[in-house]
Amino acid sequence: MNADLETLQESNKTELERRGSIFNIGAPATEAVTIRDQIAVGFGDGTVRFFQSGSDPKTVKAHKGVVLSMTNYEDHVLTGGEDGRFLKISSDGNIDEIFNFGSKWVDCVASHKDTKVCSSGKTVYIWTKNKDKPQTLEHQSTVAGLAFDNKGKRLAVSRYGGVTVWKLNNNKWTASNFTWKGSHGTVTFSPDTKYIVTAMQENQIHGWRINDKADLAMRGYPSKIKSFTWVGDTPYLVTSGSSDAVCWPFDGKEGPMGRKPIVVANGGKELATFVKALNGEKAVFTGFTDGSVLLAEIDESKKPIMIRSSTGSEVSTIAISSDNSQILIGDMKGSILLSSLWADN
Amino acid sequence: MENTSQVPVTVLTGFLGAGKTTLLNRILTEQHGRKYAVIVNEFGEQGIDNDLVVDADEEVFEMNNGCICCTVRGDLIRILSGLMKRADKLDAIIVETTGLADPAPVAQTFFVDQDVADRTKLDAIVTVADAVHLSSQLVDHHEAEEQIAFADVILLNKVELVGDNDIVKVNDRIRKINPFAKIIKTTRCDAPLDEIVGLNAFSLDRVLDIEPDFLESDHDHEHDDDVTSLSFVSDTPLDMDKFQDWFGNLLRTKGQDILRSKGILNFKGEEERYVFQGVHMLMDASPMGPWPKGKDRSSRVVFIGRDLDNMNLKEGFDNCKSA
């Protein structure tokens, strides 16, 4: 009986699970970012682990409590923790404490070139090259999301009631406010920097066209949107929160205004919890509440491919190595799949 | 639906100086081997003896759902979802509110936010009241009334400083506002901890604990904005459609003034008891098993709020009786 069961499970494995490695860390994977040929993952036990194909992950004991936020910075990662520390960590385990906020969490981090940014409470702290003291930007309520535009000249800060977009001119930051009632979380600039979009506490995303502050309300989701990603040249903003990956077109003058999204990667009764673009392709990885992951083209007539089968724990992060060769999938139970995306790797 | 993976959350309210921190430190030091997270808002005032203290700003957010009184604690949503990513499982979370806080947004957070509702559950609202000062605080601060009105448990603290007559008076005053809270008289918050944490007071099946002797209370009061309570009992089965119409409309139109509502209902033609409990406009309702054999099938409802006299509650409830 046991042997039969084993065979059955083996045959249920996906191609990527068969050729990849599975690590059980035992703490939720909270964030993942790519640094060269490595993928750094932050966990609920405060560790940051650096994964690389063909070797065991390197573990860095970074925070006491949850790694709340992470981004890449030159050859390092920046992390913010429940322990109030904002850290710069190298893959060989060197930890540089940039700042300690004590009993206040470091909720969000961001970077652009040599600029390091974090938020704690209502304040954003910005460290620029060769300066020990950070510049600070104050807000009316707790900061829930940070994003630079692709030139690093504008910094979007989401909060209750909308987004503040700070613009850098002659070393001074000036604010422009984008208002929409409700609580705004994760924030992103469109790749052409014409739009900003936030995931709200309500089951909707909200966008603004930056030049005229026109509102885009994208509703109809059955759950909160925890993840979004820009895909392809159109581009599409692909979002979690529904039983499919919901893809809003941001081309033309009006973007998604008055248009219907494309829906791909149907998860049946499972809801999408994490989405990640496959760089250079019009395709997206979608992780679901049961741990399964599908790869789908942004084309409703194409069938998605099963990348990872169900683990029973929701997908909390997906990262792709910078050369597009490796994928890492992490879930809330701390199971990590690291696998090569292509058969000949 | 009981979900054992939900971490219970106890909310501690009470005016500054009533004894919240004393109670908090008792819970943390006397419950050995349990792992608690404490979310505090008056950090630095007095030491709290725990590994995991989270410093938060009380941020009351309006939900963008067209419901005007639907406010939530944005900081709680953020902190609770962060705490749920920890590797070690917490036995409980305690939220200490500032002395002047309105408890409604805290309670509503657990009704409104799906992530919070999936992973945590509101265990009870515990209010620490100062036996010496409560009467005057009730006159001067509507927040004091709200903290009494929302409570599942009230620690009437510092009773050693008050004469017996005054204790009876303040006890009666509390009862007039909140007929279903459990009142525990304490000195230095010395109540048994199992009567404070792990109560499951917001679980719908606890609504069945409403005692049938909370009959219509007399409600003579000086100000129209006083918080009072009214309760009704009916031995005649209710008509489900009529009740839903009346109650739904009542919460929609008067929900701002109705702080809490609870009830057990006997609907005509239904074998099961129906229970509900609400916070302002939000409510949770469900069938809760058959009526116990040999006991009266009487419907009981309790309202706590302001201006209840002008809501025609008795008439509305009576109209729901099946013909």
Image (spheres, grey):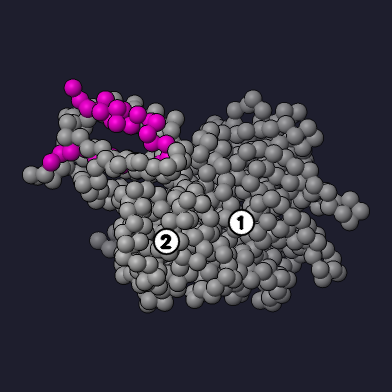
Q: Does the magenta stretch include residue B302?
A: yes
Q: Nearer the viewer, residue B165 or A4?
A: B165
Locate residue A298 relative to residue B101 in the image: left or right.
right
Count of labels in the image: 2
According to the picture, the residue beneath numbered tag 1 turns out to be: A319
Amino acid at dot 1 = Ala
Q: How packed is label 2: few (under 14 Cα within 10 Å), some, or many (20 or more)? A: many
Q: Distance between the residues labelled 2 and 1?
A: 52 Å
**SS label for mark 1:** strand
Look at label 2 and name its amino acid.
Answer: Ala
Residue bounds of the magenta highlight: B296-323
Residue at the farthest top position: B323
Q: Residue visible at 60% across and 41% down?
A: A182
Residue picked out by circle 2: B129
The answer to whether residue B302 shows anywhere in this view is: yes
Q: Residue at x 47, y 56 (%)?
A: B136
Residue B250 lies, in percent from the top left, at 39, 31
Q: Residue furthest right?
A: A170
Q: Where is residue A263 in the image (x, y as percent from the top left)?
A: 55, 34
